[in-house]
Amino acid sequence: MAFDYEQYLRPGKLPHIWCPGCGHGIVMKGLIRAMDTCGLEKNNTAIVSGIGCASRLPGYVDFNTLHTAHGRAAAFATGIKMAKPEMDVLVVGGDGDGVAIGGNHFIHACRRNIDMTYVLLNNYIYGMTGGQFSPCTPVGAKASTTPYGNPDPTFDIAKLAIGAGATFVARTTAFHATQIDKLIAAGLRHKGMAIIEVLDDCPTAYGRRNKFRSVIDMMKRLKEIAVPIKAAAHMTPEQLEGKVLTGILHQEERPEYCEQYQQVIASAQGD
Amino acid sequence: MSSPKVEIIESYCKGCSICVEFCPTDVFEMDGFLAKVVRPEACTKCMQCELRCPDFAVKVH
Amino acid sequence: MAKKVALLQGNEACALGALYAGCSFFGGYPITPSTEVAEVMSKELPKTGGKFIQMEDEIAAMASILGASLTGAKVLTATSGPGISLKQELIGYACIAEIPCVIVNVMRGGPSTGMPTGPSQSDVMQAKWGTHGDHPAIALVPASCQEIFSETVRAFNLAEIYRMPVQILLDEINGHMRERIEFPEPGELEVIDRQQPTVSPADYKPFDDSQGDIPPLASFGSEYRYHVTGLNKAADGFPTAKPELVDAEERRQLRKIEANRADIEKNEEYLTDDAEFIVVAYGTISRSARYAVDVLRKEGIKAGLFRPITLWPFPEARMAELANQVKAIVVPEMNLGQMILEVERVTRRVCPVEGIGRVDGEPITPAQIVAKVKEVL
């Protein structure tokens, strides 16, 4: 049975701005299904983004939505969640937005373990500005600002999030459509900072510069590089060369920031 | 049970061909820059096309 | 009953004024010489059930208060020169998205790290022109600790009424100076809360100007849902690049200020009625200027003081009137000539306008001002 996305979409906003074959739409559908699964109430949910292709997502969905400045989504979201902890707060955005210009906010939101769900769409490139390399562009890859190949090492976003203190870290790809909503739903249910990285494709700005002949080539690559974390346990380092682990990569319980602050209030009020 | 109805909203379809490529029973074909349902009777309702259509253009009823 | 009194720093008075106004969220980052504002808020806000957060940087502090404001909270941040430079992009965001907030800038020497513990008044133009694009600006420049308290309350009122950021410009001197202040009783100073929409949620448009230039701002988490963006937007909040809509939006945002100058402007005049020479000064330096005017009057020189308390929008009309009355205007300020540019502009130089600039970390003394007035006699 077709899923009724329309109930969560703002009327008259489709078709969206994303290019043919861009996986952002697949992720948006997964996000909607996850919010539906978890029963998020529209009035009680805020979705916050920064700048970039992925950051246009909130404009399409019928919640409280906040399209902020480049890189700053997590900091705006922190203000919302702190001021109104009863709201469900999500952040969506891309790799450049999240871990380049927004890197500081990203790691500190993880450190605080504030109860938010951050869906990071990693397509290895700055798409909206025409294909400049990001901190996630593979070494050697071509971008409009790496005409001789990218000399910059890459961030492993999941490791970054775990190292910074996020208590739920998961990864999947735009190809693995059903896993997207399962992982986002698990992140929404998790109390604390949940990071869900979705490896995505950018046929327009990345693919055509890096010998992907088509959208399908890019999607097949996402399928091929993904290794479920449980399967990886039985694989050799040689077999894992060039692969990325998917699934829930890390989960722990740690005090949540807004709850911790309630103790500050209690102390201040002499309880 | 009636056979599934596969619908493409043409005004949303951007012709990426993801549905054509990943449908296990070849329900779709490209027709110029748009995907087209050509073998609806082959549909097994696996939903792979609807799940992966980035443009909200494919619906399986 | 006698009023409660205390000996307070300007920065402390600012924080307590914010609490009086109903501030329930502070997002900050440590920076000299503003840090006491954050320290007081960290102690006092949780007592009221409010939230204090020290963010990872100045930009995040600004972002956090804007997020909190959208939930309906009255919000404050405090910073100084380098911090205000970092916050500028999001001050612009608050202007275009029309999100109420109050920003305290305890001005210090600059540019860059400059003189962190030295006073200055060098952010006058930054308060107006610091962020890119055309946008409205309100900046208040209180002089005494008592006035810092009351002007902070007024800053919150203006932010909530006009749905925009309001800056309070202090400096290292009046931020750290201690004075006796009397606490107003609750209700003694007017406290204005944000106007709420009255239309049905289905009909709500966050930038609908059909009922006036300042559309009501609903709170996230209420029965109203809407979209906020830093892009130019239409009445419904969604991005637009239609020239007529963008133009109308930009002009409406400036009109919020221009059409309400009478409500926003606030000046103090001292011995200006018969004045032949006027000193135009603000904030800490207005105190030196007032003393200088007294000295000059004792010597038989008809001097007066014109003191903007609202620095932006600049009090154009009254300043122009005074210029037609006097023989000369002297503008002392702890910078190398910022507000004087406005004085020259609005008076169209109908009389000589002479500046006294100082950027060595020392205040401008009454003697300097007296000497300058005598020089232009």
Image (cartoon, coloured by chain):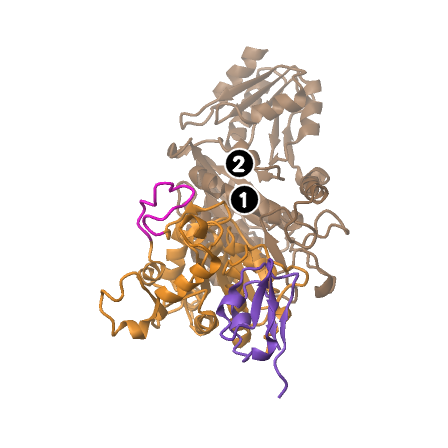
Dominant SS in magenta: loop
Residue on which the image places disc 2: C130
Instruction: List x then y, in percent, for residue B33.
Output: 60, 58
Q: Which chain does the brown colour mark?
A: C
User: Is residue C294 found left or right of A193 in the rendered image?
Assistant: right
Marks 1 and 2 sit apart, C-alpha to C-alpha, by 9 Å
Q: Secondary structure at mark 2?
A: loop
**Is A142 within the magenta?**
yes
Q: Secondary structure at mark 1?
A: helix
- Residue range in magenta is A138-154
User: Which residue is located at x 54 percent, y 11 percent?
Assistant: C375
Badge 1 or badge 2: first in the primary sequence:
1
Q: Which chain does the purple colour mark?
A: B
Q: Are marks 1 and 2 in contact (CB under 8 Å)?
A: yes
Residue on which the image places disc 1: C91
User: Is residue C365 found left or right of C307 in the rendered image?
Assistant: left
The chain identifier of the residue carrying mark 2 reads C
Instruction: List x then y, in percent, for residue C46.
Output: 46, 61
Q: Which chain does the orange colour mark?
A: A
Residue sitting nearer the eye, A188 or C69: A188
Split into 4 quadrants, where in the image is the C terminus of chain C? top right
Split into 4 quadrants, where in the image is the N terminus of chain C? bottom right
